[in-house]
Amino acid sequence: MKQRNIAVCIILTIVTCGIYGLYWEYCIVEDVNTMTGDSQFSGIVVILLSIVTAGIFLMYWMYVTGKKLDDMIGDNGNRAVIYLVLAIFELSIIDFCLLQNEINQRAA
């Protein structure tokens, strides 16, 4: 797992019109798989299924990932619901920021 500067990732995503965002999504999926010990979906699969389903699969993945993180951390957080609601309202970049923050805390 690698720590990434969230502000730089956001700026690069905007400047590259979302291309860096796809790479960032891939990295987040792979890091979450490493962190949780579950590799049900690889980064490429999540990106391709998200594109093919017009973002619906990304909403599902965000919810499942939130559940995994809640179980792993052991608190009664509502990460799954928060991630899903943000994804429904097309604010997945905030989801990526929250997930990257979790990764950065664990990678330190």
Image: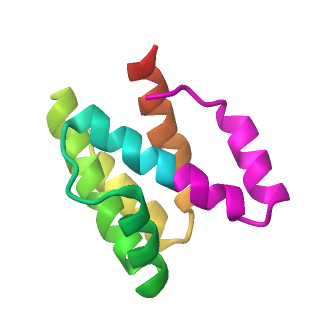
For the question of whether residue 95 can be seen, the reply is: no
Q: Residue at x 45, y 41 (%)?
A: 99
Q: Is residue 13 magenta?
A: yes
Q: Residue at x 75, y 38 (%)?
A: 8
Residue that lies at the very extreme toward the top in this rendered image = 108
Tell me if residue 41 comes above or below residue 99 in the rendering.
Answer: below
For the question of whether residue 63 can be seen, the reply is: yes
Q: Residue 29 location in percent, x, y? A: 40, 50
Question: To which quarter of the image does residue 106 belong?
Answer: top left
Q: Residue at x 55, y 26 (%)?
A: 3
- Image quarter where the N terminus lies is top left
Magenta-colored segment: predominant secondary structure: helix
Q: Is residue 14 magenta?
A: yes
Q: Closest to the observer: 4 or 98?
A: 4
Q: Residue 98 location in percent, x, y? A: 49, 41
Q: Residue 22 location in percent, x, y? A: 59, 61
Answer left or right for 60 relative to 104: left
Instruction: Provide the residue span drawn in magenta.
Output: 1-25
Question: To which quarter of the image does residue 15 belong?
Answer: bottom right
